[in-house]
Image (cartoon, helix red, strand yellow):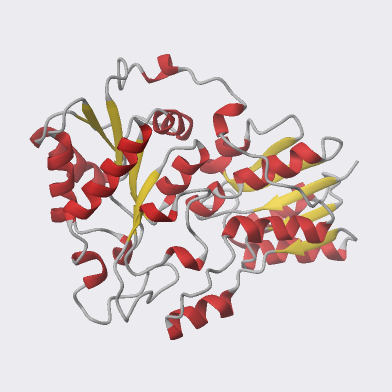
Amino acid sequence: MSKVLVIRLSSFGDVAMLVPVIFSVAAKYPQDRFSVMTRKAFAPLFENLGFNVNVIPLDVKKKHKGIRGFFKVIRRISTMGFSHVADEHNVLRSKGIRYFMKMSGRKVAYIDKGRKEKENIIATKNLAVPLKSTVQRYQEVFDKLGFPAEMVFNNYFDFIPRDFSSLRSIVTEKRGRWIGIAPFSKHKGKIYPMDKMEQVVASLSKEQDTTIILLGSGKEEQRILSAWAEKYPNIINPTGKLNLEKELLLISYMDVVLSMDSANMHLASLVQVPVVSIWGATHPNLGFFGFRQDMKNAVQIDLECRPCAVFGELPCQRGDYACLERITPDSIIQRINNVLDKKN
């Protein structure tokens, strides 16, 4: 029996994209054991993937922070009998862990993030050939370790029953169409302007048999979403009321999710909900598109300066964020309605 340590600490969306791979590998090798080391907040994503999958949660902000925290992790994993290490993160912390494990005789493989390929696309704007998806890159790590596996994952709730009653404090029952709207992201280059997004919310909230469910976190996001919920009809704002398990459950009942290039796109993908995604500074062809999502539902415009960043973290060189500002609310609404019409 092999024992495989899998490392992916952040970010939220990247961790979510690891779920289909872990399930598929663990399903093919039931005689082996797979332990996913990730942030404590992300642990629920892996807790129900199979009897041979478990989680090593890290508190990277306190208990496992810095050099002392690193050596606490090393001491812990050195006694757990791992035979293999799959470094799906390839950052300083994970490099240190895999170096220690390699020196201790474990077989090690790590992700090739394709940094040069991505930098080349940013420099040349040549998008003719899409890069490998992050999911594919995760799979390649297991291939190198000797655990190749076909993708057999479909839906997170194939493994645990959906219990709608646990959502009773937020919704009483589902009526009509549910549209999830997740208008935020970490970087400005990936956020559709709030005034235009409000127009989308206002228009959709007036449609017959339609409920809008807003998704966000943090004080400022809560302030904006609360204002929309008070201003427009048929809106539910569960911000601050959901843990990760309940958020996944709630998303699973939605008919479509409108998201930025952000974690909610990946969460919806885990529960087979179609996503209309908005792309500004970044681009789906860089490898971060939602798992099994339809590229036709990626809303974006062609500009000679796009994409300008892999993660959307750089300030706009034009100064006007035209990649986002020029996307019309009507084009987004039309794309959402196209998805809903296909489901009917």
What residue is drawn where x is 75% and y is 49%? 5
Asked whether residue 330 is in view, the answer is: yes
For residue 326, what is the image quadrant? bottom left
Residue nearest the observer in this picture, 84 or 231? 231
Quadrant assignment, res 57: top right
**Residue at the (37%, 77%) spot, across then down:** 308
* Image spot of residue 181 (x, y percent): 29, 42
153 or 146: nearer the eye? Answer: 153
Work out whether residue 98 or residue 214 is closer to the camera in this orientation and state it. Answer: 214
x then y, percent, for residue 144:
80, 61
Give coordinates of residue 242: x percent, y percent: 38, 31
Name the quadrant containing residue 216. Answer: top left
Residue displayed at 39% across by 29% down: 250
Q: Which residue is drawn at 57% across and 56% down?
A: 65
In the image, is residue 26 above or below residue 137?
Answer: above
> Viewer-proximal residue, 154 or 182?
154
